[in-house]
Image (cartoon, rainbow, N blue to C red):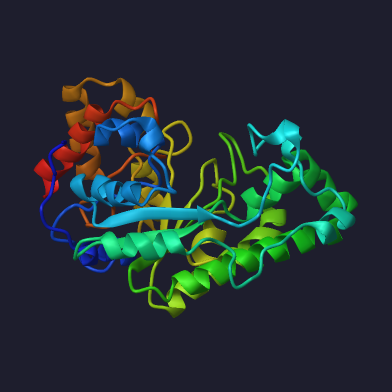
Amino acid sequence: MAKSLRKEHDFEQFLKVLRRDGKPDYLPFYEHIASPEFMATRMEITSDQVNWSDDRFLRRYVDFWVDLGFDCIPLEIPLNCPINVHEAAKESRGSESGITISTMADFDAYPWPDLSRPIEFSFFEKIGKLMPDGVKIVGGVSGGPFEWVSWMMGVQGLSMAIYTDPELVGRMFDMIGGLILSADRQLATMDTVGALRQGDDLGFKTSTFLNPEHLRQYVFPIYTRMVAEAHGAGKPFVLHSCGNLKEVYDDLIDDCKIDAKHSFEDQILPVDQFKAQYGRRVTPLGGLDVDKICRLSHDEIRAYTRKMVEKCFADGHWALGTGNSLTDYMPVDNYVVMLEEGIKVAG
């Protein structure tokens, strides 16, 4: 079995990072997700044992994060909204071939879940019972408002419908937003959930997928209500979003009032530059470039990690982690070297 990197855990230290309220006693860690292959390699199990329907895996999932030294366990569960209704869409829900709703008739005929049960909450309940003292879930719905609507309508279909059928687009965002908000409202009441989070990839290398004005019309009002649900329960809110969001950072920070931002890519905006520009208003999380963690030697990873800790953790308002996620192709030992160096430098 892989060795544990930390023996003690204290979610309050991570809360200091999210709230920018004092410097934590040590450097917390944060990741959005880990791929099945990465987890299997670290756990020394086969990839078919990464099975969410097997309660034995849930125990292993908790141990995976705890043994890596995390005070928080990332957890997201998708809406109970079937997408792969066409044979051609079974392999890729993001494909245009997976379009499920194109017309108002499709919308009306779709088997929308009840607002009282938008997701399977049992995963949060089971994992909550398995966590050791000092550890909390940072959780939410898998897939955000933009992602769900674009999956169900197709990116092209959504983009065209904004102009040709705005009523349908409005109903789609109202429905998806309502389901996510219902899930967040219920998750926020759980003592084992320490913060809410949402992944919703809004952009690519040079811009957002939708015009910022359309994000302000359809997506950001949902974010604002999601954050309000978290804050109403006394819990912070983390947004994970890939892409170049320079046109909407002020919206996300000042209007939606997110507490922390995750997902950074050096080719778009390195995390240390983001922190220098926005760090007084929002907490950056992670940001070490995935490509560097995959390709650099161990000594180079140690030097790179040390440099980023010194740049980003001077005020304590940052957590160590990658810029995106723990991928199948990331060498596990490279990632562990990164965490170990973070502990060596900042506790």
- Residue at horizontal 84 percent and vertical 48 percent from the top: 102
Q: Nearer the viewer, residue 296 or 7?
A: 7
For residue 92, say whether it is visible.
yes
Q: Is residue 97 left or right of residue 258?
A: right
Task: Using the rendered view, name the quadrant where residue 137 is placed.
Answer: bottom left
* In the image, residue 164 above or below residue 41: below
Q: Nearer the viewer, residue 214 or 15?
A: 15
- Residue at horizontal 57 percent and vertical 71 percent from the top: 182
Q: Nearer the viewer, residue 117 or 315?
A: 117
Task: Using the rendered view, name the quadrant where residue 266 is placed.
Answer: top left
- Residue at horizontal 20 percent and vertical 64 percent from the top: 134
How many marks overall?
0
Q: Quadrant of the N terminus?
A: top left
Q: Position of residue 252 (x, y in %)?
A: 53, 60
Q: Is residue 200 left or right of residue 238?
A: right
Q: Position of residue 176 (x, y in %)?
A: 67, 61
Q: Position of residue 7 (x, y in %)?
A: 10, 53
For residue 96, say whether it is visible.
no
* In the image, residue 117 above or below residue 249: below
